[in-house]
Amino acid sequence: MRRHWLWLGAILFGAALLRLPALWWGLPPAIPHVIASDIRCSYAFDEDDILTAISFSNAAKGDFDPRDYHWGTLHLHLLQFWMGAAETSGAFTRAWRDAYYHMVPGDFDTVYAAGRLLSTSLALLSIALMFLLGREAGGGSVGLWAAALVAVSPAHMMASTQIRADITMLALVTLTVWLGLRSLGSQSSRAMVWMGAAAGLAISAKYIAALTVIPVLLLVLARNHARPAAWAFVAGAAAAGFIFGEPYVLVKPQEIFQSAHRVLEANTSVPPRFAVSIPMLLGKQGLYAARFSVGPPAFLLALAGIVLMLRKRSPSGLALLIGLAGSIAALLPLAWPLLRYQLPLLPFLAVAAAFALMRFRAAPRAALGVVALSFPLFASLAQLAYMRSPHPANEALRLILKETPPGVAISRLAAELPPLNRKIYPMGPNPFLDDLSASPPDWVLIADLPEQEYPAGNLDALRNDYELLGSFQSTRRFAWASLGESGAPHDWKYTHPRMALYRRRDR
């Protein structure tokens, strides 16, 4: 037992070493032009939405309302207190809100690093909980292998270095399932109540967690032949957990419902050109899980582990399979095949892979385990290298400010990539969505973030009518670990998009 805890400590230490050097990645420079743009986002889009939302709160006046409810608010509330504590500790030279809005050199980067450090801390907690879940499912060795797989997972590593609600949700989903396994076969209402409270907290972190945790709750209650009073206690604990994480549901229920509904509506009303069918969505997410989440060898082991669980039909295995099915179902309403959306799959894939690994004898198990860990580890090391390198968007920004005359419109994907002052460089037509030939812009900046190809006509125009002024990309690292970069989801490429700046020849 003590040996297992020592190994877990080593895994957590290694996971921290992999993540902490990356906390400052993907930030635009705090120079006058960028400051004047009024854009405060990183190149991991949406991080600024969370910082901006919590900046409006005022703890001194008892105002903790994050004013943004479309994910769930638990992570935002945690971040409110976390940033306040960082400010009190002297992490910034002035109030963090001022450092953020005024883009104070040095402090602006520290604001993002501090916010990301909360995600990293919760990520380490999720790894520890992963060990407990695996140990409950199949013993200490299963727990250690599962924790190690999550620790080196590139999807987990990326999410733990961004200001997002996903890692908080993952930690609480893992906690819920672990408590659920511990509750199986128990007639103790207390154990099931704690499970319900954890489920409510998970849902308050990100609503989509409901599709994972509620089926596990129902299974545990049904397998335990719980009395009606126990069902009521668990439901009450889940409601209490949700209200604790999202207290403003008591005073703004309609606004919170409408906010979540708008997101769901946006995901279900995708233009036909970009719509992804359900089979294609699930196929892409499965491929992403194999390439960018647990690695190809561990993914194959996980499939074998799922088959073994189905054959064994143990209550704990059934609970894990129900949770996995719920996590897969949660991919559907999200509609977009993004890597961070499959984080709830990680605990179940990791335990299944570890479960299959334990079927081998000691020597082949160790060799196969090293191979299984090597693929995601090297993919994570590649991400760390990208995060520590100059960001291509900042390289493009430097060339634009040097070569492009003020007042010229620049055709680009988004004003934030890189953050340009639109009073100086107005937005031209979008090179991905619009027809450049209809009104040819003088300057075009493209990036490979879209999963689909740019319109053929626009690519022809760039080849025939424009000269390439500069291309910006990070040196590819360990591409074998993810079976190459082709077809990667765009949130995998946040750290290292390929970008190019073009100028029209007949100017």
Image: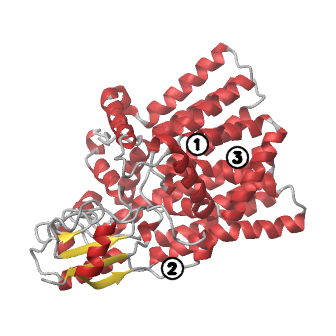
Q: Nearer the viewer, residue 15 or 42?
A: 42
Label 2 crowd bin: few (<14), some (14–19), many (20+), radius 10 Å? few
Under circle 1, the secondary element is: helix
Q: Nearer the viewer, residue 248 or 362?
A: 362
Q: What residue lies at 52% left-to-right and 45% top-to-bottom?
A: 169
Identify residue for label 2.
476
The total of numbered circles placed on residues is: 3
Q: What residue lies at 37% left-to-right and 55% top-to-bottom?
A: 83
Q: Which mark is residue 308?
A: none
Identify residue for label 3.
133
Q: From mark 3 to mark 2, how far is it between C-alphas?
A: 35 Å
The quadrant the C terminus occupies is bottom left
Callout 2, which amino acid?
A: Arg
Q: Is residue 260 left or right of residue 328?
A: left
Using the rendered view, name the quadrant where residue 471 is placed. Answer: bottom left
Callout 3, which amino acid?
A: Leu
Q: Position of residue 387 (x, y in %)?
A: 45, 73
Label 3 crowd bin: few (<14), some (14–19), many (20+), radius 10 Å? many
